[in-house]
Image (cartoon, rainbow, N blue to C red):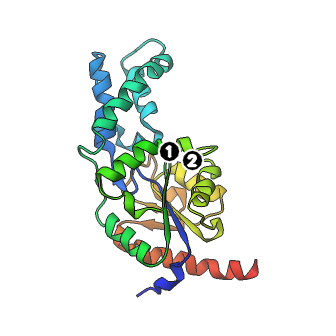
Amino acid sequence: MADLTVLDGTTIAFDLDGTLVDTALDIIGAVNAVLIGENLAPLDYAKNRAFVSRGARWLLQSGLVASGVEDPVARTATLFERFTRYYETHIADESLPFPGAVAALKELRAAGTKLVVCTNKPTHLARRLLSELEMVALFDGVVGVDAVSASKPDAAHLVEAVAAVSGDIKRSIMIGDAEPDARSARSADVPLILVSFGYSETPVSVLAPDVLLDQFGDLTDACCELVSGMQPREALG
């Protein structure tokens, strides 16, 4: 059994979509509602699930391109507000936390960690999703794309998310599912855990995380191991 006391005072930053919550059905569903409303072909869920990490705007533009719409960039800008309104209303129709996620969050909080969501979703949508799923109270902060100077994969998003909950970036861990999370963590020199069940276009092992997580039941032990490894570096510093 891991010594949970090592986690006291650490900050753990979580990506949201594809890491904590399986949101692909609702995101792609909202994109498809807009496309169908324009008499265009909907996106195939199975073929596009891995691209959710690129964001809804990219998915919408991809659907417009596939249908041969003229000037898809401009058309995406015009239609994106419609997507946002629809998605906000249907944000948790099908979305659910991944198995074991809530229990792991509660265990980490009990061990004295600060938990922050570091997501490229707009903050108000991230908070709404977490509220609908009765998860928002588990976090010390929710830091979306609109609340930072630069979004993932820039290190600034992670650094500013940790600062938003008065955490120490030198005693922090990033948990995500795809390349933007990995690049942000590496740029910030923060240990990285990637989950194997999210929305990555490439095998997550290629992204070389410090820990590859197959289930949330192993998260606390993984965090303890990584934080224990920080101790010598801190002592030297």
Quadrant for the N terminus in the image:
bottom left
Asked if residue 202 lies left or right of residue 170, the reply is left
Secondary element at image label 1: loop
Tell me how far mark 2 sits from mark 1, CA to CA.
7 Å
Q: How many marks?
A: 2
Q: Earlier in the sequence, mark 2 or mark 1?
A: 1
- Marks 2,1: beta carbons within 8 A: yes
> Looking at the image, which residue is at 28% across and 48% down?
95
Q: Quadrant of the C terminus?
A: bottom right
State whether residue 2 is above or below residue 130. Answer: below
Please name the residue shown 34% across and 59% down the image: 135
Q: Say which of 126 and 236 sits in front.
A: 126
Q: Name the one closer to the observer, 87 or 200.
A: 87
Q: Label 1 amino acid?
A: Asn
Left or right, 23 with reference to 110:
left
Q: Quadrant of residue 64?
A: top left
Tell me if residue 82 comes above or below residue 193 in the rendering.
above
* Residue at 56% from the left image edge and 77% from the top image edge: 227
- Badge number at residue 64: none
The label number, if any, that marks residue 120 in the structure image: 1
Q: Decide: few, some or many residues near mark 1? Use Cα within 10 Å; few <14, some 14-19, many ≥20.
A: many
Rendering coords of residue 75 (x, y %): 45, 17
Please name the residue shown 34% across and 38% down the image.
27
Farthest residue, direction left? 93
Residue 51 in percent (x, y) is at: 41, 40
- Residue 82 lies, in percent from the top left, at 36, 25
Q: Is residue 91 above or below residue 67?
A: below
Which residue is the site of mark 2?
Answer: 152
Secondary structure found at label 2: loop
Direction top: furthest residue? 70
Relative image position of residue 221 (x, y in whole percent): 44, 78
Q: Amino acid at mark 2?
A: Lys
